[in-house]
Amino acid sequence: MRLFGLIGYPLSHSFSKAYFNQKFENEGVDAFYENYPIASIDEFPKLLAEQPALEGINITIPYKEVVIPFLHTSSDVVKKTGACNCIRIRNGQLEGFNTDVIGFEQSLLKSLKVDHKKALVLGTGGASKAVQYVLDKLGIGFTVISRKADPATGTLSYEELSFSNQQNATLWINTTPLGMYPNTDACPPMEYSSITNQHYLYDLVYNPAETMFLKMGKDRGAIIENGQDMLQIQAEEGWKIWNAA
C-alpha cells in the first residue's frame, strides 16, 4: 500500500485526509493518506524516519516556509515564493513544490472581474506568498496587511488601513487562519462597512464553508469564495506530481 500524508499543527480543520482516502477508494488505488500533526518542524526528520514508506507529503499551517531547509531540491515556484506545500519523496530525496499557486489562480479566475484591479492580501505566511505570486502574474496591484507593519516590505498594519483604502481595493484575500474551525467567530479586523457590491472576498479557509469574513461580504452584496475549490485543485496537482514519471 502506498502512503501519503499531511503535516501541520493543528490539523483538526483539515479535509485532506478524508478527501484523498475517498479519492483512493473511488479510483481503486491501493493507498492511504494520514494526518501527521507535529508540534514543531524539528519533529519532521523523526517522522520521516518512522514512516519510510511515505511517497508524498502536503504541508499546511504553519510549516510551508520553515520546511524548505529540509528539501533536497525545490521547484522554481518554491524558490520564488519561499513557500512549499507539496513534497515528493523518491529514493530518500525530498523534492519541494508549490501547488497553492495553481490552485489559487484557477479558483480566483472563476469569479474575477475586470474592475478587480487592486487587492488587499491579509496575512504574510506561506499561503500569502503563493497569493502574492499569482497577483503579480495577473498584474493586480496589492498591499499586504498584517498585525504588525513592516516598512521594509511595504506591509501595512490593520490600523494603518483607511476606509477609502478598503473601499477602493475591491479584492480582499484572507490568507490567515482567522475564522477557521474551531474559532469560527473570529475574522480579520477590517472595516466591513466599506464593502460594496463590487467587492470580491476570497478566504483561503474552507472549514467552515462560510467564515465570518465571507458572511460580512455576502451581507453587503460582494462576490465570495472559500478555499474549498483551491484545496481540490491543489490536491489534484499534488497527485499528478506524486505520480509523475
Image (cartoon, rainbow, N blue to C red):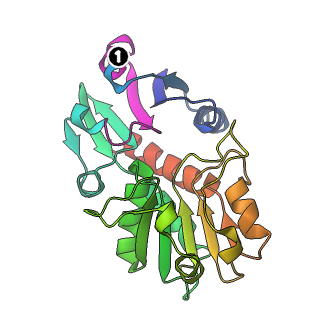
In this orientation, which residue lies closer to the viewer: 160 or 145? 160
Pick out the residue farthest to the right: 219
Q: Position of residue 172 (x, y in %)?
A: 56, 69
Of residue 33 and residue 216, the one placed in the foreground of this image is 216
For image coordinates 67% across by 38% down, the residue present is 26
The image quadrant that residue 86 belongs to is top left
Q: Is residue 170 above or below residue 39?
A: below
Instruction: Give the residue at x 48% y 29%.
Output: 5
**Residue segment shown in magenta:** 43-66
- Residue 227 x/y as whole percent: 60, 54
Q: Which residue is mark 1?
A: 52
Instruction: Specify whether residue 76 is in view.
Output: yes
Mark 1 burial class by Cα count in 10 Å: few <14, some 14-19, many 20+: few
Task: For residue 245, say whether it is visible.
Answer: no
In-image side of 5 versus 77 (left or right)? right
Query: What amino acid type should be assigned to the residue bearing mark 1?
Result: Pro
Q: How many marks?
A: 1
The answer to which image quadrant residue 150 occupies is bottom left
SS at badge 1: loop
Confirm whether the magenta stretch covers residue 56: yes
Would you say 69 lies left or right of 221 here? left
Q: Position of residue 228 (x, y in %)?
A: 63, 52
Residue lying at 20% horizontally and 41% vertically, measured from the top left: 73
From this viewpoint, which residue is outermost toward the front? 159
**Rendering coords of residue 183 (x, y %):** 68, 39
Q: In front here: 25 or 128?
A: 128
